Image (cartoon, rainbow, N blue to C red):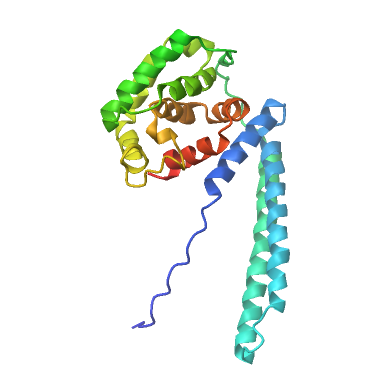
Amino acid sequence: MNTSPEQPALPLITVHAEAAASAQRRVSDLLEAAGIRPGEAQHLLAVIEAGALERAHVEVTELHTQVPADSSAEFREGWLSSVQTVASQLTHIADRTVRQARAAATAEPPPAAPRPPRRPLPTAVDSVGEEQVRRVREAAERIFVSLTGHTDYDRALSDEILTVVLKCVSAEDQEGYVGQLEAFAEAQRKRLARLYALYGPGGQFADESHCYLPHQPESVVVCERLDTVPMWLAAVWNRELDAQTALERFTLYWRHGL
Protein backbone atom coordinates (compact mmCIF):
# COMPACT_ATOMS: atom_id res chain seq x y z
CA MET A 1 0.00 0.00 0.00
CA ASN A 2 1.41 3.38 -0.98
CA THR A 3 1.46 5.68 2.08
CA SER A 4 3.62 8.44 0.62
CA PRO A 5 2.09 11.91 1.07
CA GLU A 6 0.28 13.29 -1.96
CA GLN A 7 2.33 15.91 -3.79
CA PRO A 8 0.63 19.32 -3.84
CA ALA A 9 -0.37 20.55 -7.28
CA LEU A 10 1.74 23.39 -8.62
CA PRO A 11 -0.14 26.65 -9.18
CA LEU A 12 -0.95 27.47 -12.80
CA ILE A 13 0.17 30.78 -14.26
CA THR A 14 -2.82 32.25 -16.11
CA VAL A 15 -2.15 35.98 -15.92
CA HIS A 16 -1.53 36.44 -19.65
CA ALA A 17 -3.34 33.43 -21.12
CA GLU A 18 -6.59 35.17 -22.06
CA ALA A 19 -4.84 38.23 -23.49
CA ALA A 20 -2.41 36.03 -25.44
CA ALA A 21 -5.22 33.96 -26.95
CA SER A 22 -7.08 37.11 -27.94
CA ALA A 23 -3.94 38.64 -29.46
CA GLN A 24 -3.21 35.44 -31.38
CA ARG A 25 -6.73 35.41 -32.85
CA ARG A 26 -6.41 39.08 -33.78
CA VAL A 27 -3.03 38.64 -35.49
CA SER A 28 -4.26 35.52 -37.29
CA ASP A 29 -7.32 37.40 -38.58
CA LEU A 30 -5.15 40.29 -39.78
CA LEU A 31 -2.75 37.95 -41.59
CA GLU A 32 -5.60 36.11 -43.27
CA ALA A 33 -7.20 39.42 -44.29
CA ALA A 34 -3.86 40.30 -45.90
CA GLY A 35 -4.00 37.12 -48.01
CA ILE A 36 -1.89 34.78 -45.86
CA ARG A 37 -3.21 31.22 -45.82
CA PRO A 38 -4.51 30.10 -42.38
CA GLY A 39 -1.90 27.34 -42.09
CA GLU A 40 0.93 29.73 -42.94
CA ALA A 41 -0.39 32.27 -40.44
CA GLN A 42 -0.44 29.62 -37.71
CA HIS A 43 3.10 28.59 -38.65
CA LEU A 44 4.33 32.18 -38.30
CA LEU A 45 2.69 32.48 -34.88
CA ALA A 46 4.18 29.15 -33.83
CA VAL A 47 7.67 30.35 -34.79
CA ILE A 48 7.17 33.41 -32.58
CA GLU A 49 6.03 31.16 -29.72
CA ALA A 50 9.05 28.93 -30.19
CA GLY A 51 11.34 31.97 -30.09
CA ALA A 52 9.79 33.02 -26.78
CA LEU A 53 10.36 29.52 -25.41
CA GLU A 54 14.01 29.63 -26.48
CA ARG A 55 14.45 32.94 -24.67
CA ALA A 56 12.96 31.29 -21.58
CA HIS A 57 15.35 28.37 -22.12
CA VAL A 58 18.34 30.74 -21.98
CA GLU A 59 17.15 32.21 -18.69
CA VAL A 60 16.47 28.77 -17.21
CA THR A 61 19.92 27.45 -18.10
CA GLU A 62 21.46 30.43 -16.29
CA LEU A 63 19.94 29.11 -13.07
CA HIS A 64 22.67 26.47 -12.86
CA THR A 65 25.02 29.20 -11.61
CA GLN A 66 22.63 30.27 -8.86
CA VAL A 67 22.84 27.30 -6.52
CA PRO A 68 22.83 28.62 -2.92
CA ALA A 69 26.43 28.84 -1.76
CA ASP A 70 25.90 26.95 1.50
CA SER A 71 23.93 24.04 -0.03
CA SER A 72 24.99 20.43 0.28
CA ALA A 73 26.41 18.34 -2.53
CA GLU A 74 23.14 16.39 -2.70
CA PHE A 75 21.14 19.64 -3.00
CA ARG A 76 23.49 20.91 -5.72
CA GLU A 77 23.06 17.70 -7.68
CA GLY A 78 19.27 17.93 -7.45
CA TRP A 79 19.32 21.60 -8.41
CA LEU A 80 21.40 21.00 -11.54
CA SER A 81 19.28 18.00 -12.50
CA SER A 82 16.11 20.06 -12.20
CA VAL A 83 17.55 22.88 -14.33
CA GLN A 84 18.60 20.40 -17.01
CA THR A 85 15.15 18.76 -17.00
CA VAL A 86 13.28 22.05 -17.37
CA ALA A 87 15.67 23.35 -20.05
CA SER A 88 15.36 20.11 -22.01
CA GLN A 89 11.57 20.21 -21.81
CA LEU A 90 11.45 23.83 -23.04
CA THR A 91 13.58 22.86 -26.04
CA HIS A 92 11.27 19.92 -26.76
CA ILE A 93 8.14 22.10 -26.54
CA ALA A 94 9.66 24.74 -28.86
CA ASP A 95 10.59 22.12 -31.46
CA ARG A 96 7.19 20.43 -31.21
CA THR A 97 5.33 23.74 -31.56
CA VAL A 98 7.09 24.58 -34.83
CA ARG A 99 6.94 21.00 -36.15
CA GLN A 100 3.19 20.67 -35.62
CA ALA A 101 2.49 24.08 -37.15
CA ARG A 102 4.68 23.30 -40.16
CA ALA A 103 2.84 20.02 -40.70
CA ALA A 104 -0.51 21.80 -40.56
CA ALA A 105 0.69 24.47 -42.99
CA THR A 106 1.87 21.94 -45.59
CA ALA A 107 -1.14 19.62 -45.26
CA GLU A 108 -3.62 19.50 -48.11
CA PRO A 109 -6.24 22.13 -47.26
CA PRO A 110 -9.86 20.93 -47.12
CA PRO A 111 -12.30 22.27 -49.70
CA ALA A 112 -13.10 25.83 -48.85
CA ALA A 113 -16.59 26.34 -47.51
CA PRO A 114 -18.47 29.23 -48.99
CA ARG A 115 -17.93 32.31 -46.89
CA PRO A 116 -20.93 34.17 -45.58
CA PRO A 117 -21.27 37.64 -47.05
CA ARG A 118 -19.19 40.18 -45.20
CA ARG A 119 -21.09 42.59 -43.04
CA PRO A 120 -20.48 46.17 -44.06
CA LEU A 121 -18.15 48.06 -41.77
CA PRO A 122 -19.93 50.27 -39.24
CA THR A 123 -20.15 53.91 -40.21
CA ALA A 124 -18.43 56.12 -37.67
CA VAL A 125 -20.01 59.39 -36.59
CA ASP A 126 -18.06 62.60 -36.11
CA SER A 127 -20.40 64.01 -33.49
CA VAL A 128 -23.53 63.11 -31.55
CA GLY A 129 -26.42 65.53 -31.23
CA GLU A 130 -27.67 66.90 -27.92
CA GLU A 131 -31.03 65.15 -28.31
CA GLN A 132 -29.38 61.74 -28.70
CA VAL A 133 -27.14 62.41 -25.69
CA ARG A 134 -30.21 63.37 -23.64
CA ARG A 135 -32.17 60.26 -24.70
CA VAL A 136 -29.32 57.91 -23.84
CA ARG A 137 -28.57 59.72 -20.57
CA GLU A 138 -32.18 59.44 -19.44
CA ALA A 139 -32.21 55.70 -20.25
CA ALA A 140 -28.93 55.22 -18.41
CA GLU A 141 -30.27 57.17 -15.43
CA ARG A 142 -33.36 54.95 -15.22
CA ILE A 143 -31.18 51.84 -15.21
CA PHE A 144 -28.62 53.24 -12.78
CA VAL A 145 -31.18 54.52 -10.27
CA SER A 146 -33.11 51.24 -10.38
CA LEU A 147 -29.90 49.40 -9.45
CA THR A 148 -28.41 51.83 -6.93
CA GLY A 149 -31.17 54.14 -5.71
CA HIS A 150 -28.58 56.90 -6.13
CA THR A 151 -29.65 60.21 -7.72
CA ASP A 152 -26.83 62.52 -6.61
CA TYR A 153 -24.68 62.39 -9.73
CA ASP A 154 -23.19 64.99 -12.06
CA ARG A 155 -25.42 65.40 -15.15
CA ALA A 156 -22.97 67.79 -16.80
CA LEU A 157 -20.26 65.13 -16.49
CA SER A 158 -22.68 62.53 -17.88
CA ASP A 159 -23.32 64.65 -20.96
CA GLU A 160 -19.60 65.31 -21.45
CA ILE A 161 -18.73 61.62 -21.33
CA LEU A 162 -21.70 60.44 -23.39
CA THR A 163 -20.87 62.96 -26.12
CA VAL A 164 -17.61 61.02 -26.54
CA VAL A 165 -18.70 57.44 -25.78
CA LEU A 166 -21.64 57.58 -28.18
CA LYS A 167 -19.20 58.18 -31.03
CA CYS A 168 -18.45 54.46 -30.58
CA VAL A 169 -22.00 53.66 -31.71
CA SER A 170 -22.22 53.35 -35.47
CA ALA A 171 -24.46 55.64 -37.50
CA GLU A 172 -26.60 52.59 -38.34
CA ASP A 173 -27.19 51.83 -34.63
CA GLN A 174 -27.68 55.34 -33.24
CA GLU A 175 -31.45 55.45 -33.69
CA GLY A 176 -32.08 52.14 -31.93
CA TYR A 177 -29.33 52.46 -29.35
CA VAL A 178 -31.61 53.21 -26.37
CA GLY A 179 -33.40 49.91 -26.97
CA GLN A 180 -30.04 48.15 -27.35
CA LEU A 181 -28.85 49.64 -24.04
CA GLU A 182 -32.02 48.58 -22.23
CA ALA A 183 -31.74 45.04 -23.58
CA PHE A 184 -28.11 44.89 -22.45
CA ALA A 185 -29.03 46.10 -18.96
CA GLU A 186 -31.77 43.49 -18.68
CA ALA A 187 -29.45 40.69 -19.78
CA GLN A 188 -26.60 41.86 -17.52
CA ARG A 189 -28.67 43.09 -14.57
CA LYS A 190 -27.06 40.78 -11.98
CA ARG A 191 -23.58 41.67 -13.20
CA LEU A 192 -24.34 45.41 -13.13
CA ALA A 193 -25.88 45.11 -9.66
CA ARG A 194 -22.72 43.38 -8.45
CA LEU A 195 -20.55 46.11 -9.98
CA TYR A 196 -22.42 48.88 -8.17
CA ALA A 197 -22.66 46.92 -4.92
CA LEU A 198 -18.88 46.70 -4.86
CA TYR A 199 -17.70 49.97 -6.41
CA GLY A 200 -20.77 52.22 -6.76
CA PRO A 201 -22.31 54.67 -4.30
CA GLY A 202 -22.14 53.15 -0.81
CA GLY A 203 -20.46 50.06 -2.24
CA GLN A 204 -18.11 47.79 -0.35
CA PHE A 205 -15.04 49.18 -2.16
CA ALA A 206 -16.46 52.54 -3.23
CA ASP A 207 -13.80 55.18 -3.83
CA GLU A 208 -14.97 57.97 -6.11
CA SER A 209 -11.53 59.61 -6.02
CA HIS A 210 -9.99 56.41 -7.40
CA CYS A 211 -12.57 55.93 -10.18
CA TYR A 212 -15.66 58.11 -10.55
CA LEU A 213 -17.41 56.10 -13.27
CA PRO A 214 -19.24 53.62 -10.95
CA HIS A 215 -20.92 56.65 -9.34
CA GLN A 216 -22.28 57.95 -12.66
CA PRO A 217 -25.22 56.62 -14.75
CA GLU A 218 -23.24 56.78 -18.01
CA SER A 219 -21.22 53.86 -16.60
CA VAL A 220 -24.02 51.61 -17.91
CA VAL A 221 -23.24 52.80 -21.44
CA VAL A 222 -19.50 52.32 -20.88
CA CYS A 223 -20.15 48.71 -19.76
CA GLU A 224 -22.23 48.02 -22.85
CA ARG A 225 -19.55 49.46 -25.16
CA LEU A 226 -16.79 47.54 -23.31
CA ASP A 227 -18.65 44.31 -24.06
CA THR A 228 -19.41 45.30 -27.66
CA VAL A 229 -16.56 47.41 -29.11
CA PRO A 230 -13.82 47.65 -26.46
CA MET A 231 -10.99 48.66 -28.81
CA TRP A 232 -13.11 51.34 -30.50
CA LEU A 233 -14.15 52.70 -27.12
CA ALA A 234 -10.57 52.84 -25.83
CA ALA A 235 -9.35 54.61 -28.97
CA VAL A 236 -12.04 57.30 -28.87
CA TRP A 237 -11.87 57.74 -25.09
CA ASN A 238 -8.07 58.10 -25.00
CA ARG A 239 -8.15 60.54 -27.89
CA GLU A 240 -10.87 62.85 -26.59
CA LEU A 241 -10.98 62.55 -22.80
CA ASP A 242 -8.21 63.48 -20.40
CA ALA A 243 -9.11 60.55 -18.16
CA GLN A 244 -7.38 57.46 -19.53
CA THR A 245 -6.76 56.00 -16.07
CA ALA A 246 -10.47 56.19 -15.22
CA LEU A 247 -11.40 53.93 -18.13
CA GLU A 248 -8.54 51.52 -17.40
CA ARG A 249 -9.59 51.13 -13.77
CA PHE A 250 -13.27 50.82 -14.63
CA THR A 251 -12.45 48.17 -17.25
CA LEU A 252 -10.69 46.13 -14.57
CA TYR A 253 -13.73 46.45 -12.29
CA TRP A 254 -16.12 45.31 -15.02
CA ARG A 255 -14.03 42.47 -16.43
CA HIS A 256 -12.18 41.10 -13.41
CA GLY A 257 -13.45 42.72 -10.21
CA LEU A 258 -16.79 40.97 -9.87
Residue 112, image x, y percentages: 61, 25
* Residue 235 in sight here: yes
Relative to 2, 245 lies left or right: right
**Number of marks in the image?**
0
Relative to 107, 158 lies left or right: left
Residue appearing at x 66%, y 42% in the figure: 104
Q: Nearer the viewer, residue 2 or 107?
A: 2
Q: Nearer the viewer, residue 102 or 200?
A: 200
Looking at the figure, which quarter contains the C terminus?
top left
Q: Is 79 drawn above or below residue 212 in the view shown?
A: below
Residue appearing at x 37%, y 41% in the figure: 199
Residue appearing at x 64%, y 85% in the figure: 77
Residue 145, image x, y percentages: 29, 27
Relative to 29, 197 lies left or right: left
The quadrant where residue 120 appears: top right
Residue 55, image x, y percentages: 72, 59
Residue 205, image x, y percentages: 36, 47
Residue appearing at x 39%, y 82% in the figure: 4
* Residue 186 in sight here: no
The quadrant where residue 3 appears: bottom left
Looking at the figure, which quarter contains the N terminus?
bottom left
Q: Is 198 drawn above or below residue 119 in the view shown?
A: below
